Image (cartoon, grey):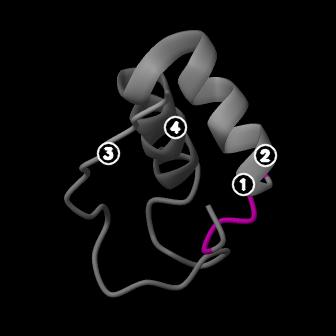
Amino acid sequence: MTEYEMATWVDAFALLRRGGPRDLIERVREIEAADPTGRRWPRYKYGDDATIVFCQW
């Protein structure tokens, strides 16, 4: 979220509520794919492991 400046945390939780963890992870992967060499968003590897736990009461 913060690394790629893709959305606010409010936006991320809205996406989780609508599409679940898979949609959020897919969105992050799309952003990583848009910068495969890490020029815009410097990072030491192309993509990282992805785990999301979302609990809502």
For disc 3, the marked residue is: 52
Left or right of 28 on screen, residue 25:
left
Disc ID at residue 9: 1
| Residue plotted at (75% across, 65% down) | 5
* Residue type (three-letter) at the residue carrying disc 2: Val
Residue at the top extreme of this rendering:
18
Q: Give the SS element for disc 1.
A: helix
| Residue plotted at (78% across, 46% down) | 10
Q: Give the SS element for disc 2.
A: helix
Q: For mark 4, does the 10 Å Cα neighbourhood hold few (<14), some (14 to 19), or many (20 or more) residues? A: few
Q: Distance between the residues labelled 4 and 3?
A: 17 Å
Query: Which marked residue is nearer to the observer: mark 4 or mark 3?
Result: 3
For disc 2, the marked residue is: 10
Disc ID at residue 35: none
Q: For mark 1, does the 10 Å Cα neighbourhood hold few (<14), some (14 to 19), or many (20 or more) residues? A: few
Residue 25 drawn above or below residue 44: above
Percent x, y of residue 28: 50, 45
Q: How far apart are marks 1 and 2 (CA)?
A: 4 Å
Residue 38 drawn above or below residue 49: below
* Residue type (three-letter) at the residue carrying disc 1: Trp
For disc 4, the marked residue is: 30
Q: Do the residues labelled 4 and 2 touch (CB within 8 Å)?
A: no
